[in-house]
Amino acid sequence: MIIRQMTINDYDEVMRLWEAAPYIVVSDADSRENLARFLEKNACFNIVCQIENRIVAAVLCGCDGRRGYIYSVAVEHKYRIRGIGLEMVNEVLKRLRAEGIDTCHLFVSKDNLWDQDFWSNTGWEQRKDMLIYTQRLGK
């Protein structure tokens, strides 16, 4: 098992992984061009796990200079419940701390009860004081 930094060359394999994950919504924001720009700005916070030269897990994380934001943690179904995702998240948190970031938020779908339970049981605190609003800016 190798955990390494994600590059744009991983795009097709990461997309395969995201599209197979039941609670990750792939949108226009996930185009190759957009992901390349995101990786350029947040290079060290995005990682993949390879087993036998195949990507089986990926963490997408960004940072605004004050806080980290984990947008997705995807682990191929047959590799779940082995601690791979948690190990990768801990690696990302270590990298954020090394950059002086002391808070990280994790996005979980409100319908994804399994992940909500998992993150609650691994030390993450569910925020109940905030809502997220979105505005599509168009092109």
Image (cartoon, rainbow, N blue to C red):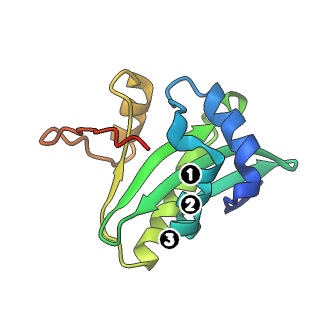
Q: Residue at x 65, y 26 (%)?
A: 20
Which image quadrant: the N terminus?
bottom right
What residue is pinned by disc 2?
37
Of circles 2 and 3, the one toward us is 2
Instruction: Name which of mark 2 and mark 3 comes first in the sequence.
Output: 2
Q: Position of residue 120 (x, y in %)?
A: 33, 39
Q: In the picture provided, is 95 more to the left or to the right than 11?
A: left
Residue located at (55% from left, 23% from top): 22
Give the class, few, some or many, for how many residues have Cα within 10 Å of label 3's Cα (few <14, many ≥20).
some
Name the amino acid, label 2.
Arg
N-terminal label among 1 and 3? 1
> Quadrant of residue 114 in the image?
top left
Q: Which residue is mark 1?
A: 34
* Residue at image mark 3: 95
* Residue 37 can be seen in this image: yes
- Between label 1 and label 3, give the one nearer the viewer: 1
Task: Give the amino acid type for the residue marked by disc 1 in the picture.
Answer: Asn
The reply, left or right, for residue 97 in relation to residue 131 is: right
**Measured Cα–Cα span from mark 1 to mark 3:** 22 Å
Judge the density around disc 1: few (<14), some (14-19), many (≥20) Cα neighbours within 10 Å.
few
Residue nearer the viewer, 120 or 136: 136
